[in-house]
Image (spheres, rainbow, N blue to C red):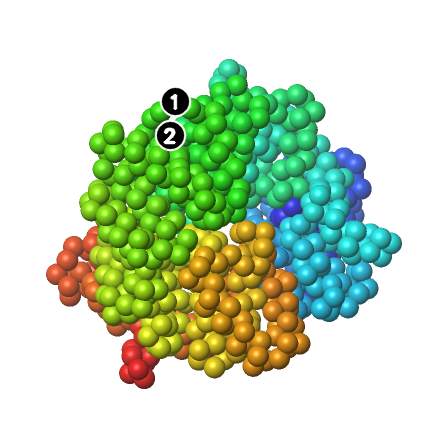
Amino acid sequence: MAGVGGVGKSRLVRSMLNGFRPACPDGVHVVDLADALDPQELRTRVLSVFGLIEAADDFVAPHGSWCGRALLVLDNCEHLDRSCAELVDLLLDAVPALRVLVTSRHVLGVGGEHVFTLLPFDVTGATDLETARAQDAVRLFAARAAVAVDDSNWVDIVRIGRCLEGIPRALELAAAWSRQHGIEQVVQRVEANGSIDFLTATIHRSFTLCTGAQRALWMRASVFEGGFDLRAADAVCGDPADPTASEVLDLLADLIDRSIVQVEREAGRVRYWMVDGIRQYGLGRLRELGEESVFRLRHLDHYLCVAEDARRSLSPGPVDRDIAAGLRKDAQNLLAALEFSFVEAPRPANSLPLALALSDHLLLRCAPAEAVRLFGEVLSVNRMPSADRFTAQLGYAAALVLVGDVRGAELIASYLADVRDDGDEGLAGRALFISACNRLFQGDAKGALSEYGASRRLLRHDDVAFRIAAVSASAVCHAFLCNPDHALVAAREAVAACRERGEVRSCSYALYASALTRWMRGECSRAEHDLTDGLRITRRFGDLVLGAAQIELLAWVSGTSGDHERAAVMLGVARSLWHLAYGKSTFWPQYWSQFHDDCVRTTRGTLGEERFIAVLQRTSRGIQGLDEAVALVLGSQPAAQSAPGRTLLSKREWQVAELVAEGLTNKEIAARLVIAQRTAVTHVDHVLAKLGFTSRTQIAAWVVDQRQREQVQ
């Protein structure tokens, strides 16, 4: 049983010993090696347990008639891992019926070894008192702190669990500290220092047990934020000047075996990451050596190459989904490199390609004010006119529009004049799109509608995402101008275009436009269906502002349907997301504000002031991000609304989904539809991705649910 220090390996094994005894007639024998000093002491302790003796020929041999149908538990043996591996090998040769259970931060690497990695507690998903009480991390902290989890403290305890990354030993130490200083003081301490504050001794012990090369990789890899891949590790952590240095991959494997580095596999990609306390320890050691800037520069150079490689996916034209997915994974590293380029790097002009690679992250997942700051700094150190600078200027203007800054309109007008002089109609189309968004936010839906149309005429044919966004936004304009029929036509056109072109992210905007239109037409059930489908996509891409708008619209839909309690819940969730995005509880341009005010007034009047405020506060307190908000919202959906709908799939993909539900293989699907087997595989992958599923069984169950819902409708 492997795992990071403090994760609870020894305690879990000891709690299971009684369950092992019936299968071990010769007993369960525990040898604690935490204080064993050398290999000789290890041998002495283990051999004495079984009455074994050392033999000159074989090192160990059975004594008497003992059959060895026993379980040997070697606890805390990471500091003697090689000696333990040798001894276990010899014991199993001498006593084949013996079973050995080892707890260690390091994998032994002996033949026949089965590794179970014990992970920290899951600290995600607590959005209210009930879900908080169900979390293992919360229960452990509360038990050790001798407190009851209630409305007054559950948010703080959940926050402590997150900051300590669910590591049981850190939670216990923090709980003990809270008895003297109070939970509020613990929150301040862990938010400032994380798990390293309570696990320094444990992490230091792991560090001392590593070889020099392993320590070097640990320290160098600490400059990564949010994980890294092998290519990044080679570029940043390798030592090309030393031909005798160990390969990075081999050293990574060593650190994985020692529970320093963790591995995650997703869609065929392998990424590595460290628990933040371990990463911070390594970074501190690197800083002590005076080498942090050296490897920060390497980090900057590598992610500059990543940004340059991604250029074709960020310019007007079709988006390479693999590159876009890679940029989302590397967003934290790109952001760290961008910040470093401002303050310490000797080449601040490198910030421009990094900012372009981060455009989606800055405009979707960052607070808009932070996007304004970063784009502004990039433009201040990159003053030479270029197509890249103009693209960054558009990002800056878009961020200004999102915060309601009037400078956005002035900048867009000057950018349009410049780009028209250069004759680049595609970029002019993008600038017009942002100008139209500004008009819509300022309350000029008629002017915005005209500019969205002009934008579509100028945008390149293969600039699919912007073209679909212009259609979706036109639907919103029609809705606000009281043209519901035109709005529905435009919304349907946008959804159909998404299905035809495989534009998953754009579909969330199209579905929002469709839901707004259907709500205005009184079609609340279909509006809610579109919103829940769209929220799944929004969650996948991390679009904070759109997620807040979708959940706000769900509040309006719930209120119109007469479910005012649920409307209050949705208002509370949306309020949390608005606060995360803007630092205040609401942000509404002119058209949206009247509907928000109407919903609040009606919900408050129906529930009463006291009940309304209580629901609002209770719901908003536990939301720390978009993931939790969407989880709470989807968890509150009626069963009929909880599954994604057919609108996400093209006609062909729906046919494939139906055949999967019939139990057909990919080869059989290809034969039935007269397509290549590889094409069938691609369609199945698209269905899984769009619906957020991981198995064909989920597709089959979903198809059955869709058919039943359609019969009801």
Report which quarter residue 694 is drawn in: bottom left
Q: What secondary structure is found at the residue carrying circle 1?
A: loop
Q: Which residue matches tag 2?
A: 389
Report which quarter residue 500 is drawn in: bottom left
Q: Residue at x 65, y 39 (%)?
A: 278
Q: Is residue 554 visible?
A: yes
Point out the image quarter for the C terminus.
bottom left
Q: Residue at x 65, y 33 (%)?
A: 282
How far apart marks 2 and 1 lie (CA) works out to: 8 Å
Contact, CB < 8 Å: mark 2 with mark 1? yes
Counting from the top left corner in percent of width and height, residue 532 is at: 41, 67
Q: Amino acid at mark 2?
A: Arg
Counting from the top left corner in percent of width and height, residue 333 is at: 50, 36
Q: Which of the pair 617/433 is nearer the observer?
A: 433
Instruction: Say which label, 2 or 1, has the lower sequence index.
Output: 1
Q: Residue at x 68, y 29 (%)?
A: 285
Q: Is residue 21 above or below residue 398?
A: below
Counting from the top left corner in percent of width and height, residue 211 is at: 64, 28
Q: Which residue matches tag 1?
A: 384
Q: Is residue 394 above or below residue 511?
A: above
Counting from the top left corner in percent of width and height, residue 107 is at: 60, 43
Q: Which of the pair 57/180 is nearer the observer?
A: 180
Q: Amino acid at mark 1?
A: Met
Q: Is residue 90 visible?
A: no
